[in-house]
Amino acid sequence: MKITPTDIPDVLLIEPKRFGDHRGYFAETFKASALKDAGVELDWVQDNESLSAQVGTVRGLHFQTPPSAQDKLVRCVQGSLLDVAVDIRVGSPTYGKHVTAVLSAENGHQLLVPAGFAHGFATLLPDTLVQYKVTNPYAPDCDAGIAWDDPALGIDWQVTAEKAVLSEKDTKHPVLDDYDSPFTYHA
């Protein structure tokens, strides 16, 4: 399992090794000891799954606030998506910056998104199936988000606002400058 820091070092790209033959492949998609060796020790409490039928479906930018903030380990098991993590930790040298990664069933890559980051994705293929682990269960009273299309973030979602398929909730989030983030950066 290859674990690589992204341009925002707290967000990690994880590339499980695949062992293939004429039948297909085998991969260890989660290995606590490999994460621990990379300095990551988290208690995963829930697995989630979402299916997005249409290309250009945007989910995000979501997060949970303390005391139910979540770390996420995201992977795509069918289709392909552009995964996005935005640093919303006040005082962080990368506050308001983002990283992206293409996660697909074909490449098997995963993204570790720590608490203190807004997370979202846009589907690149139809019927994209996403699975992710979280360190806290869903808490409706801590559910929050920022606008996926906030121009100050400069995210190239690979889908236009006119063609994006959104939930009603995701059309109502504030831009980052109008959000009082409860997350603080700790060096």
Image (cartoon, rainbow, N blue to C red):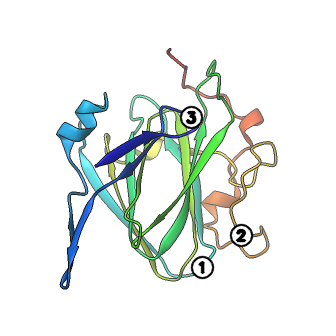
Residue holding disc 3? 8
The kind of residue on which mark 1 rests is Val
Task: From the top left corner, tell me how far across and down residue 90 is, in percent.
Answer: 62, 22
The mark total stands at 3
Q: Tell me the crowding category of disc 2: few under 14, some 14 to 19, or many 20 or more residues within 10 angstroms, Cα based.
A: some
**Cα distance between the residues tagged 3 and 2:** 23 Å
Of the residues shown, which amino acid type is indicated by label 2?
Answer: Val
CA separation in Å, label 2 and label 1: 9 Å
Residue identifier under label 2: 159
Q: Residue at x 58, y 74 (%)?
A: 124
Which residue is label 1 attached to? 55
Instruction: Please tell me whether mark 1 sits on a helix, a strand or a loop.
Output: loop
Q: CA distance from mark 3 to mark 1?
A: 27 Å
Residue 173: x %, y % from top left: 68, 49
Residue 6 relative to residue 73: left or right: right
Kind of residue at disc 3: Ile
Q: Quadrant of residue 118?
A: top right
- Secondary structure beneath dot 3 equals loop
Q: Earlier in the sequence, mark 2 or mark 1?
A: 1
Question: Residue 102, labelled with which disc?
Answer: none
- Splitting the image into 4 quarters, where does residue 123 fall? bottom right
